[in-house]
Image: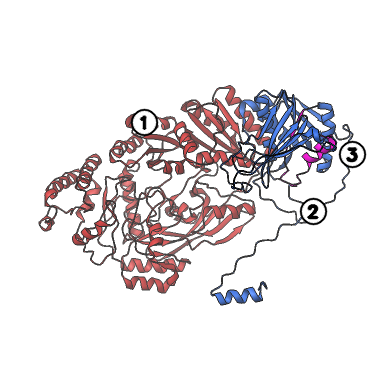
Amino acid sequence: MVNRNCRATLRLLTLINRQGHPHPPLSSSPSGHISHSYLILPFSIAFVFLTVLCFYSGTGIDACWKQLQRNNVHGEHKIVSFFSPLASSLKTRQWGVKIQSRCYGSASVLVQRNPKFSKLNDEDVRYFEGILGAKNVIQDDEKLITANTDWMRKYKGSSKLLLQPRTTDQVSEILKYCNFRCLAVVPQGGNTGLVGGSVPVFDEVVVSLSAMSKIISFDKVSGILVCEAGCILENIISFLDSEGFIMPLDLGAKGSCQIGGNVSTNAGGLRLLRYGSLHGNVLGIEAVLADGTVLDMLKTLRKDNTGYDLKHLFIGSEGSLGIVTKVSILTPPKLSSVNVAFLACKDYSSCQKLLQEARRKLGEILSAFEFLDSNAMNLVLNHLEGARNPLPTSLHNFYVLIETTGSDESSDKQKLEAFLLGSMENELISDGALAQDINQASSFWLLREGIPEALMRAGAVYKYDLSIPVEKMYNLVEEMRSRLGNDANVVGYGHLGDGNLHLNVSTPQYDDKILSQIEPFVYEWTSKHHGSISAEHGLGLMKANKIFYSKSPETVKVMTSIKKLLDPNHILNPYKVLPCSSIS
Amino acid sequence: MKIMVAIKRVIDYAVKIRVKPDKSGVVTQNVKMSMNPFCEIALEEALRIRESGLASEVVAVTMGPSQCLDTLRTGLAMGADRGIHVDSTSALHPLHVAKILRNLVQIEKPSLIILGKQAIDDDCNQTGQMVAGLLNWPQGTFASKVSPSSNHPGFKNQAFAPTMWWGFPKDKSNMSQIGKKEYTHGTMKSLIGVVLDKEKEEVTVDREVDDGIETVQLKLPAVITTDLRLNQPRYATLPNIMKAKSKPIKKFTPQELNVEIKSDLEIVEVTEPPKRKAGVMVSSVDELIEKLKNEAKVI
């Protein structure tokens, strides 16, 4: 079903592109606006044919199309569309239809702006200035461009307003007003998300939590930290470092990502193997619901079995159930002995066996187990300055990074060395290097953490984050390679210890032909092996309609009713996470 | 030909240093320790000379308590052939180290001693020079191999100055044995780092000094201390770690080497550098002038 949609919309896009016209077509329900379309008669017929085809398939995506109405956009600022940023504004003003088509991610879906959301007007801006002060109400174009574009530069919104509240009460006032006025809102943290969940799709108001970056309290005995949602992860890590503790999560984006966003996305990271997910480490949350109600669940208790534990709803909801404003998190103590080893394996099955052995021999000191394949290694060495190959003597097929964290330097090192030498004798690893000081350890981690950046520099990249049973994990990479052949560079790396594969397809430019080879094959393959189409990145906008690959319709129905309960007007982060067929 | 490399166990370069509350020193309990980065570079250079066939053996020497054996094992894992551990629990200052090294040289008889230019815990930059003085050997300090395209502040890009050659006056004892000195401004000379010539028994060293690169030619035996940009030390790979377990480590004590560890220096106090004060935002030029005049008192 979804296949047919892909083909249909792809045909549509090529039609439009062929015209060289930035002008988006007037799409409409068959019942009748076509009579008004005097400019696109030549291909409107073809288009109607296509829409009929689309309707035939009957998936949730089509319901969006039925919603379509003409919106007059006189007097609007320029509308940024992917076809042509500037010239389109003229035409669309005439036609008054706002369609955002995303050519890059899952290009197969054309999302329509929900007409029940109001448009922002000056009165709203003045009201916000009254709550926040003029300094925190931003309409400056440059700052808006950063807030409207995601880290991968794949998704671009057209929001006109960026708000920076400083207290939970201000957030509550903002949401109360937006709910009353039916203005859509996008909560934004560090804007490092990889599925387009942190940027507006159309003109939603962006509520940035960056100004709420205070560390409220820290209990040195229990290691429980209470901080506001806008604290940057790296700052929290350095604060905890001086107290002798560490954060239970660590990701490559730590320099920019904020803890509120991490919690809302249930970020996994590099230490999940040892410290578990955020569901286990977050002890309390303070969140603001869509109607402005402040839910204070900010406890600092390890155990609290009183009633339903609602904070888990917000962890991983990607800002669609409420805006997280404060977080209380349990932090583990910083252990003195950290050892990192970078190993080479000749094939994937030895990587798996190595994981089993590591779990057994290293046991409680194992804190990270990552793998990358030779394509990933080459990318990093070529595109990242300062990246150095620790095993330059020969090329290997797979590389594994193992980190151990313990309290006794000499015994940990002995354990690790014994394990590594044993694995070498059993031919599980063909070569390896052990970091002798912190600088060498960081250079090993750079090779693994720098892969996303290297991919960005190499050109266009299609990113997939999948949870697959460990035995079958690399089969997907090999199948993708055979499907795409020489057209693209398929790179596989990820958290082998958690069964999480980051599949990336690197091409010089974005190309729909390649996209059609990848999707929906990737999702179908994962679904067939009972995996998850989004292990840690979340659904966001990219996979908003793909949830059925990993969750049953009944489950999604319950999710939709929860969303309706907490956000009846659907103003929080619309068009994302749940399929739009299920919303209204 | 034997090369002796001295390595030191110091607090890891990336660790945040904290001063003890009684200001008597720096916190070393439960803090990650590792090999001094300059010593790593020295060992790497020695290994490269051996791999090019010009030396037969690299001996790594370390001095200190028994924990120093970890650092010595790292040195062996990088590729040194033998290790020597001089066991001493008292604080060793550069002069003690230099005396111990001199006495070890009389036992081991190496042709080249390579050390790091300084240790990152005391920043003394004295041991190499003292060893050369005690042994009466020529020294090439701050050995470096800066590439021509680097932004070294010493590279002045004027016209290429003619190379100046001067020998030392013959009346200075032993100076004529030391060799020639060449001095270059600018970037046009190709840089060699440390180059050994076995037949002539000489070593040519590029020294990184404030004005640029100075090339000295030393007659062996000689002392070389290494600077940051000489090479990039290798990682300790697993096969080498395995081999290191069977490499011999000889143990000495300062008494056996006839060196008396008598401290002539006493560290009186260690304090942190003053914390950087926060900046003050001023709203107008008048306020700035007023503050400069009255508060900072600079105008």
- The residue indicated by pointer 3 is B260
Which chain is in red here?
A: A
Q: Determine which of the numbered discs, if any, sits on residue B24 in the image.
A: 2
Between disc 3 and disc 2, whose residue precedes?
A: 2
Identify the chain of the residue marked 3, using the numbered disc in the image. B
Task: Determine the residue positioned at 45% across, 70% down.
Answer: A135
Which residue type carries mark 2?
Answer: Ser
Which span is picked out in magenta? B111-136
Point out residue A19 in the picture as x, y percentages from the top left corner: 19, 48
Residue B203 at x, y percent in the picture: 71, 31
Residue B104 disc label:
none
Q: Which residue is mark 1?
A: A481
Q: Distance from label 2 to label 1 (Cα)? A: 62 Å
Give the crowd class for mark 3: few <14, some 14-19, many >=20 residues within 10 Å.
few
Q: Which chain is blue?
A: B
In-front residue for pair A303/A416: A416
Q: Secondary structure at mark 1?
A: helix
Q: Quadrant of residue A367?
A: top right
